[in-house]
Image (spheres, rainbow, N blue to C red):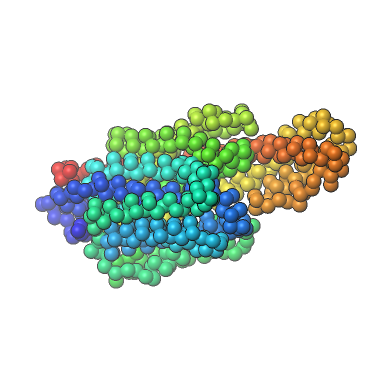
């Protein structure tokens, strides 16, 4: 068992002091550490996969479970809420009771709740199982970074975090691909259920070896659980995450704003209580001294803003391809591989080769490259319109993917590099929570911008398809007055649908059949086919315009990330010669 220590550094022992901070003794490296890394990366991949795989199965869930759109939203939101709420507590539980133990509990619970998700017969059962799944992920995920932190010496962490960054980049892309394949194959007529049941073999693949290859570690400075701090932390996260998750579907009610406002005083009480507990009782949930470290404090701020842009991008990009362009989930998912082709090698190179030489300049270049990729995407979407193909998406996705990889891997190393090993769980929990809050902010804020643009741009989309619609209707033999009536009703339908909060609902203006529009019953079938094609064209026009404007906002966000990186240390902390000797 590895026991971390906060004993005062001995000046005569260089292995106990780096920049005045106590160090773990790396004289006895775990010979199974690379096998342990493979196990925890499997678990990390399982969690990241599950966060993205659900989206492509939503239509199948809605049809198979006869679920309302609000049910579907909760199926997605339940996981995100419970996950975000448990991260800080999960990280500290690892410090207290053992990171290996809590990791295995999390993997076991995640696997079991995944099976419950796959066996759910009603929307309520699935929502409950998703709450449990997210909570178990909140126990499991913080242990990934903290186990890395206490198992690998500093001179090996660059390579390790590069591999972790590659997992982050690839899982977000392969999730929709795997989800689309599983739903499309409809194995044993199980429809959407295999997207959860697949976690059973994967979870066992991580759980069984974990017992043999992961070395237990805990912090002797955190012997007691901070229950009141845990309640305050969960309350603060939920007060922010819940209204952001549900705001748009609820029409942004006043109660949502009041909840977010209430998060501020709860957070203040939390900080004051943690400060009191540190000085009086000890064993705080969050070690506030971590925020005195420039790398930790500034790095978290940059990480938050970066996740706003990237989580928002994946949301609107998926909607753009599947609804706007009418692509299948498989087509969209396979297109996403291009992003991974850029992200994975860039993540590895950034921490192993580039960051040690160029420091924060690598992350700054990554933010600018990511923004440049989005800028190229704006041009491609505007130039090709609804005729855009996967080939035209290759340049922007590769550039954005490389930029993503240059940021996501080294920032993990940078933020956690100066964290004492005794506080690895607490720091990892805070880091992961900031990521989830940033993702919730991104989905909420970018979603608001995107959907408002669909509403704003809908008249341009109608104008773009109207000439062809008129000529096609006339060629079908409709008289002038009938054409005018159909075109008018068509425009109203497109505008109402673009303004709808629930994208699965059909506005009353879209429920008229051609006969009700004054069309001769003999040609009603032909007119229905024409309107279906025109509706898809209008959606494509609307979505590429909304997508382009939303990307402009994301570019602005990434420029803020770039400016914020000036607050980061210029170089990643140099490895102490004593540490290097132990490796």
Tell me if residue 373 comes above or below residue 152 in the rendering: above
Foreground: 443 or 361? Answer: 443
Q: Position of residue 34 (x, y in %)?
A: 25, 45
Residue, x 37% and y 35% (percent of image)?
Answer: 346
Q: Quadrant of residue 73?
A: bottom right
State which quarter of the image contains the N terminus.
bottom left
Q: Position of residue 132 (x, y in %)?
A: 44, 62
Residue, x 26% and y 56% (percent of image)?
Answer: 211
Q: Position of residue 10 (x, y in %)?
A: 13, 55
Residue, x 57% and y 39% (percent of image)?
Answer: 328
Is 86 on the left or on the right of 477, as rendered?
left
| Number of on-image labels | 0
Tell me if residue 409 comes above or below residue 424 in the rendering: above
Residue, x 84% and y 44% (percent of image)?
Answer: 515
Residue 426 visible in this rendered orientation of the protein: no
Foreground: 436 or 390? Answer: 390
Residue 464 visible in this rendered orientation of the protein: yes
Identity of the residue furthest to the left in this view: 12
State which quarter of the image contains the C terminus.
top left
Q: Position of residue 222 (x, y in %)?
A: 27, 65
């Amino acid at each position: 068992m590895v026991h971390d220590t906060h004993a005062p550094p001995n000046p005569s022992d260089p292995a106990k002091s780096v920049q005045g901070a106590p160090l773990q003794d790396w004289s006895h490296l775990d010979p199974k550490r690379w096998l342990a890394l493979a196990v925890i990366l499997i678990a990390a991949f399982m969690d990241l996969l599950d966060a993205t795989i659900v989206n492509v199965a939503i239509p199948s869930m809605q049809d198979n479970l006869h679920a309302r759109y609000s049910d579907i939203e909760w199926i997605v939101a339940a996981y995100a809420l419970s996950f975000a709420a448990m991260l800080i507590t999960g990280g500290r539980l690892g410090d207290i009771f053992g990171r290996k133990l809590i990791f295995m509990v999390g993997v076991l619970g995640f696997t079991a709740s995944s099976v419950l998700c796959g066996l759910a017969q009603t929307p309520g059962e699935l929502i409950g199982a998703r709450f449990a799944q997210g909570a178990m992920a909140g126990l499991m995920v913080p242990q990934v970074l903290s186990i890395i932190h206490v198992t690998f010496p500093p001179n090996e962490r660059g390579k390790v975090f590069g591999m972790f960054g590659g997992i982050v980049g690839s899982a977000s892309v392969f999730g929709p691909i795997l989800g689309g394949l599983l739903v499309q194959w409809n194995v044993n007529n199980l429809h959407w259920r295999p997207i959860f049941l697949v976690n059973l073999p994967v979870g066992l693949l991580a759980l069984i070896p974990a017992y043999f290859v992961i070395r237990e570690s805990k912090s002797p400075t955190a012997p007691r659980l901070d229950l009141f701090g845990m309640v305050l932390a969960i309350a603060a996260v939920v007060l922010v995450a819940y209204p952001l998750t549900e705001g748009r579907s609820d029409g942004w009610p006043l109660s949502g704003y009041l909840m977010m406002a209430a998060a501020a005083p709860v957070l203040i009480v939390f900080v004051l209580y943690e400060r009191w507990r540190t000085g009086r009782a000890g064993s705080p949930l969050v070690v506030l001294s971590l925020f005195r470290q420039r790398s930790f404090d500034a790095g978290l701020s940059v990480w938050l803003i970066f996740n706003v842009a990237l989580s928002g991008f994946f949301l609107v990009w998926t909607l753009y391809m599947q609804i706007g362009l009418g692509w299948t989930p498989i087509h969209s998912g396979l297109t996403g591989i291009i992003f991974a082709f850029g992200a994975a090698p860039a993540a590895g190179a950034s921490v192993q080769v580039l960051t040690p030489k160029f420091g924060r300049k690598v992350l700054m270049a990554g933010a600018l490259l990511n923004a440049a990729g989005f800028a190229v995407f704006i041009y491609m979407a505007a130039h090709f319109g609804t005729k855009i193909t996967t080939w035209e998406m290759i340049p922007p996705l590769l550039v954005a993917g490389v930029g993503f990889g240059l940021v996501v891997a080294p920032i993990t190393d940078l933020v956690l590099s100066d964290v004492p090993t005794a506080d690895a769980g607490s720091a990892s929990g805070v880091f992961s929570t900031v990521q989830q809050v940033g993702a919730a902010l991104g989905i909420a804020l970018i979603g608001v911008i995107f959907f408002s643009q669909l509403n704003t741009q809908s008249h341009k989309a109608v104008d773009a398809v109207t000439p062809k619609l008129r000529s096609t209707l006339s060629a079908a033999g409709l008289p002038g007055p009938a054409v005018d009536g159909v075109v008018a009703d068509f425009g109203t339908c497109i505008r109402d649908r673009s303004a709808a909060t629930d994208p699965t609902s059909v506005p009353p203006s879209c429920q008229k059949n051609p006969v009700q529009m004054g069309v001769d019953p003999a040609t009603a079938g032909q007119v229905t086919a024409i309107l279906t094609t025109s509706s898809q064209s209008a959606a494509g026009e609307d979505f590429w315009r909304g997508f382009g404007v939303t990307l402009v906002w994301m570019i602005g966000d990434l420029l803020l990330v770039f400016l914020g990186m000036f607050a980061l240390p210029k170089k990643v902390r140099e490895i102490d010669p004593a540490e290097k000797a132990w490796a």
